[in-house]
Image (cartoon, helix red, strand yellow):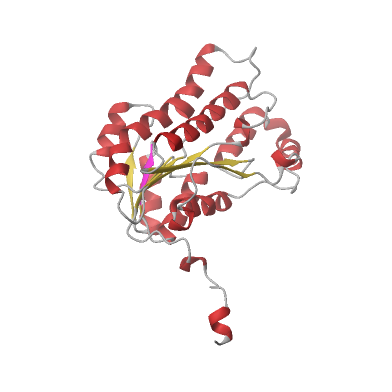
Amino acid sequence: MNDSEHSTPKTGDRVFRLDGRHALVTGGASGIGEATVKELVRAGAFVWIADINLAAAETLAASIGSSRAIPLDVTRPDSIAAAAVQLKRLDILVNNAGIGHVGSIEATEPEDFDRVLNVNVRAVYLVTRGLLPLLFAAADDRHVGSIVNIGSVAGQVGIKQRFAYCTSKGAVLAMTRQLAVEYPKTLRVNAICPGTVETPFVEAYLEKFHKDNKEETRAQLRARQPIGRLGRPEEVASMVRYLASDEAAFVTGSLFNIDGGWTAA
């Protein structure tokens, strides 16, 4: 046996393949969603880029191929139903769409709380429920449908001034575990819990709440993660690819922290 037979493949394209599979990523036109779309396409999947910003989704689809933009308001059952009828097959669902909110319980008005839970929790329920028949139908002897929920470390630890957001992400993690035990032989359901990642989501937060001390606050966000930097969307996307692949066939009901050591500290 020569050395080449012992060597590890040098390209990620030879592992965690998703050839022939169809995926849908909510909030797929930007940030972690965009990186996930690109990674799943690179792995061989066809990806539906589901986003309320259809123009951005179309631009992304045109730039990467093996994908198609689809308008989706995750909070509206009629929008989800309209999207579902366009899909011929669905093997992978990535529930990525979400919003944030800053404030303690005292500063969180009922309408703010309802809005966060509507997008971050109820929408995950609606999208998953609406697309579940497609995920079940795609299962065969080789693999079952895979759902990857994008949670947050905020669902695992308390973060000051994030009452509604922490509540919502805790619910996403609970839904992940429940679905995994409800359908153990027909569906795999896992969640990724990112720390603070460099995305338009974080930039919008800095601009809205820390416009006068943006760089100081950015430094604080880096410092709370022991690794000393913010995460990159691609790092989260790589985990999505793994969880959707056959190599993760024994993985379900699990939570994966990608947080630079935040929850370990």
Q: Quadrant of the C terminus?
A: top right
Seen from the viewer's position, the closer of residues 94 and 30 is: 94
The location of residue 95, given as percent across then percent down, is 44, 39
The location of residue 171, given as percent across then percent down, is 52, 27
Which residue is at 47% across, 58% downward? Answer: 247
Which residue is at 24% across, 47% downward? Answer: 88
Q: Quadrant of the N terminus?
A: bottom right
Tally of numbered tags: 0
Answer with left or right where residue 45 lies relative to residue 252: left
Q: Quadrant of residue 222?
A: top right
Which residue is at 32% across, 59% downward? Answer: 20
Is residue 64 at all visible to an observer of this figure?
yes
The answer to whether residue 90 is magenta is: no
Which residue is at 41% across, 34% downward? Answer: 182
Is residue 73 at all visible to an observer of this figure?
no
Overall secondary structure of the magenta stretch?
strand
Seen from the viewer's position, the closer of residues 90 and 32 is: 90
Q: Quadrant of residue 155?
A: top right
Answer with left or right where residue 255 lies relative to residue 221: left
Q: Quadrant of residue 211?
A: top right
Answer with left or right where residue 156 lies relative to residue 62: right
Query: What is the span of residues highlighted in magenta in the rendered image?
Result: 47-51
The location of residue 52, given as percent across then percent down, is 38, 36
Seen from the viewer's position, the closer of residues 66 and 206 is: 66
The location of residue 82, given as percent across then percent down, is 25, 34
